Amino acid sequence: MPKGLWIGRVDVHDPDNYKNYVAANGKAFAKFGGRFLVRGGAFETAVGSSRQRNVVIEFPSYQAALDCWASEEYQAARALQKGGAEMDLIIIEGYDGPQPGA
């Protein structure tokens, strides 16, 4: 079964409110089996636009990724941002097929 992923790009406008969100979102991620593959870190924009931070979270399934987004725990964490950040987020099903050179 393919995994599910959250791919997010974030601009932080109010670091204090964003810290509240970060402190609270782990409860939802843990409940739905989420784990960070990317959480900030150095990056280079090769093509197109970017934001200040990038995040990729892997879930055991696409459904778990959707359920985490819709959960009371995650929505409560999101509410703590209070405008602290602007985010683009997609929830996408991972690929579980043949790979190049295989």
Image: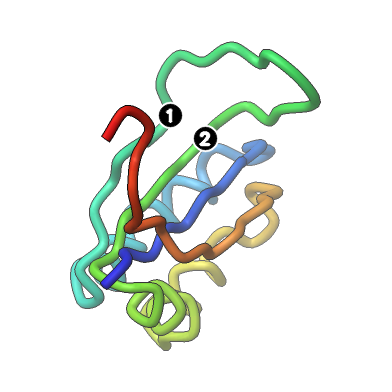
Q: Residues within 10 Å of mark 1 (few under 14, many from 20)?
A: few
Give the secondary structure at mark 2: strand
Say whether residue 74 is left or right of residue 87. Answer: left
- Do the residues bearing badges 2 and 1 touch, measured as CB atoms within 8 Å? yes
Image location (x, y in percent) of residue 20: 43, 55
Image point (52%, 63%), residue name = 92
- List the residue tagged with mark 1: 40
Q: Is residue 50 left or right of residue 28?
A: right
Percent coordinates x, y for residue 61 in the rendering: 30, 73
Residue at left 46%, top 41%? 55
Q: Tell me if residue 102 comes above or below residue 52 in the rendering.
A: below
Return the residue found at the far right: 48
Label 1 is placed on what type of residue? Answer: Gly
Compared across the picture, whether 32 is left or right of 62 comes to left
* Residue drawn at the location 32% of the way across and 66% of the way down: 2
Q: Nearer the viewer, residue 3 or 23?
A: 3
Give the total of numbered labels: 2
Give the residue type at disc 2.
Asn
Circle 1 — which element?
loop
Quadrant that contains the N terminus: bottom left
Question: In the rendering, at what x and y percent does residue 27 appear?
Answer: 24, 69
Q: Earlier in the sequence, mark 2 or mark 1?
A: 1
- The residue closer to the viewer here, 55 or 1, is 1
Task: Give the numbered dot on residue 54.
Answer: 2
